[in-house]
Image (cartoon, helix red, strand yellow):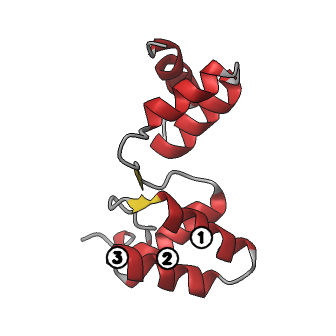
C-alpha cells in the first residue's frame, strides 16, 4: 500500500439499498440529522460504518448510490413512465443519478428503450 492510499476516499458502496431507505436517509440528511441517516443505512443494509457514511455522503452530494429496484418497477420501467409523459430530461437525470452514467450515456440509454 502506498503512502497516499490511506488518504483516498473509498468508492461509493457497491451494496444496494432499497428506495425507501435511500429516501428516508436523504430526508434525515436534509434535516441536518446525518448521524441518524448513517445509523439507518447501517441497520437496513448491513453496511459497515465507513461504507454507510460514504453512502450518506453520496446521497447528500446527489451522487450515485446503488438502489435496489422494487420488483416489477425497474429503472427502465420508471424511465418509460416518464417518457410516456414527455418528460425526457427528467428520465435522463434519473438514469444518471441511479447508475452513475454521464449525461450522454444516460440519454443514449433513454432513447434506446422500447416504448
Q: Which mark is residue 24?
A: 1
Q: Is residue 35 shown above or below 103?
A: below
10 Å neighbourhood of mark 2: few (<14), some, or many (≥20)?
Answer: many
Task: Name the quadrant containing residue 14.
Answer: bottom left
Query: What residue is at 37 percent from the left and 59 percent from the top?
Result: 16
Task: Name the quadrant containing residue 35.
Answer: bottom right
Q: Earlier in the sequence, mark 3 or mark 2?
A: 3
Q: Residue 53 placed where, x, y %?
A: 49, 76
Taking the view exactly as shown, the residue that stands out farthest to the left is 1
Q: Residue 23 placed where, x, y %?
A: 59, 63
Name the image quarter holding the N terminus: bottom left
Q: Residue 54 placed where, x, y %?
A: 48, 70
Give me the C-alpha separation between circle 1 and circle 2. 15 Å
Residue 50 in view: no
Query: What residue is at 56 percent from the left and 44 percent from the top?
Result: 97
Give me the C-alpha separation between circle 3 and circle 2. 9 Å
Q: Is residue 86 shown above or below 47?
A: above
Q: Earlier in the sequence, mark 1 or mark 2?
A: 1
Residue 89 in view: yes
Q: Secondary structure at mark 3?
A: loop
**Residue located beneath label 2 in the image:** 53
Q: Residue 22 placed where, x, y %?
A: 53, 64
Task: Name the quadrant containing residue 52.
Answer: bottom left
On screen, residue 71 versus residue 81, left or right, reads left
**Residue located beneath label 3 in the image:** 47
On screen, residue 112 versus residue 59, left or right, reads left
Q: Earlier in the sequence, mark 3 or mark 1?
A: 1
Q: Is residue 108 shown above or below 60?
A: above
On screen, residue 114 versus residue 89, left or right, reads left
Q: Nearer the viewer, mark 1 or mark 2?
A: 1
In-front residue for pair 91/64: 91
Amino acid at each position: 500500500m502506498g503512502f497516499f492510499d490511506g488518504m483516498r476516499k473509498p468508492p461509493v458502496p457497491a451494496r444496494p439499498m432499497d428506495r425507501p431507505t435511500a429516501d428516508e436517509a436523504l430526508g434525515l440528511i436534509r434535516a441536518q440529522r446525518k448521524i441518524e441517516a448513517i445509523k439507518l443505512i447501517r441497520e437496513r443494509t448491513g453496511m459497515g460504518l465507513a461504507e454507510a457514511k460514504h453512502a450518506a455522503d453520496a446521497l447528500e452530494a446527489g451522487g450515485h448510490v446503488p438502489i435496489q429496484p422494487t420488483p416489477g418497477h425497474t429503472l427502465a420501467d420508471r424511465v418509460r413512465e416518464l417518457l410516456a409523459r414527455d418528460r425526457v430530461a427528467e428520465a435522463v437525470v434519473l438514469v444518471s443519478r441511479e447508475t452513475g452514467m454521464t449525461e450522454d450515456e444516460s440519454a443514449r440509454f433513454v432513447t434506446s428503450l422500447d416504448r
